[in-house]
């Protein structure tokens, strides 16, 4: 049994699958309180679903890409059988996780998008650094960046850990409405970083306050 905030069909707004149709399964609850969080409604709102009910709802959209997100999806034990069942159905599964809980039990075939918390989030001390050693070649690491301090933190981590050689994509995402994307682009280009500048496409298409997209 899982507590689900929402299930919806939209365009993938982030990751290296940006722009593709995708089914999103947003699970309820998070034990982080990032300053820039844009889904606080997922902290508490939701209703109970059996794993089989979620899979049936996902299959209704006939889409080959599914993202499990939150909240923090790894807080709920039944997320693991959900990932297994979705993989068995033949879809590509992405898991977006806050990076503070171990990803050791995530099935290898799942594409993990690990959100490493920069200082501006207020949650840097919660990062589970062991997760970087568990990256698969298809995984992705995301840094949500508020300002120059966050940028330098992320830049230095990429260089220190050689992250560009250990995963499929490094995502540098400016906080929407706070850090202008052009400024972050200038920093990335000046340092010749092997990263992908990521804006949240769905917010440009439907607006920052629109839910279910």
Image: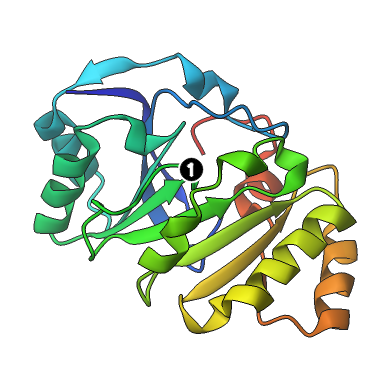
- The residue that label 1 is drawn on is 100
- The answer to whether residue 171 is visible is yes
Q: How is the image coloured?
A: rainbow
- Residue 126, percent from left and from top: 56, 40
- Residue 100, percent from left and from top: 48, 43
Q: Give me the residue at 50% from left, 84% from top.
A: 165
Taking depth in this image into account, of 42 and 114 the one nearest to the observer is 114
Taking depth in this image into account, of 148 and 186 the one nearest to the observer is 148
Q: Give me the residue at 44% from left, 49% from top.
A: 96
- Residue 123, percent from left and from top: 65, 37
In the depicted structure, whether residue 9 falls above or below residue 12:
above
In the depicted structure, whether residue 66 falls above or below residue 71:
below
Image quadrant where one finds the N terminus: top left
- Residue 188, percent from left and from top: 80, 75
Taking depth in this image into account, of 49 and 12 the one nearest to the observer is 49
Q: Count numbered badges in the picture.
A: 1
Residue 199 sits in which quadrant? bottom right
């Amino acid at each position: 049994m899982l507590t689900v905030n929402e299930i919806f069909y939209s365009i993938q707004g982030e990751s290296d699958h940006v722009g593709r149709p995708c089914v999103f399964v947003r699970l309820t609850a998070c034990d982080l309180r990032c300053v820039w969080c844009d889904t606080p409604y997922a902290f508490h709102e939701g209703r109970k679903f059996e794993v089989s009910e979620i899979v049936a709802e996902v299959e209704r959209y006939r889409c080959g890409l599914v993202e499990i997100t939150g909240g923090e999806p790894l807080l709920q034990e039944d997320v693991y059988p959900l990932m297994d069942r979705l993989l068995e159905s033949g879809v590509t599964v992405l898991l977006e996780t806050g990076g503070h809980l171990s990803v050791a039990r995530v099935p290898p075939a799942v594409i993990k998008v690990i959100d490493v918390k920069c200082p501006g989030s207020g949650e840097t001390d919660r990062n589970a650094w062991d997760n970087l050693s568990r990256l698969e070649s298809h995984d992705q690491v995301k840094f949500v960046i508020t300002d120059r301090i966050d940028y330098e933190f992320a830049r230095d981590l990429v260089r220190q850990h050689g992250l560009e050689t250990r995963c499929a994509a490094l995502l540098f995402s400016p906080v929407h409405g706070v850090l202008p994307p052009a400024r972050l682009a200038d920093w990335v280009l000046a340092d010749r970083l092997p990263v992908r500048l990521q804006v949240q496409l769905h917010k440009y298409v439907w607006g920052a306050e629109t839910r279910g997209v």
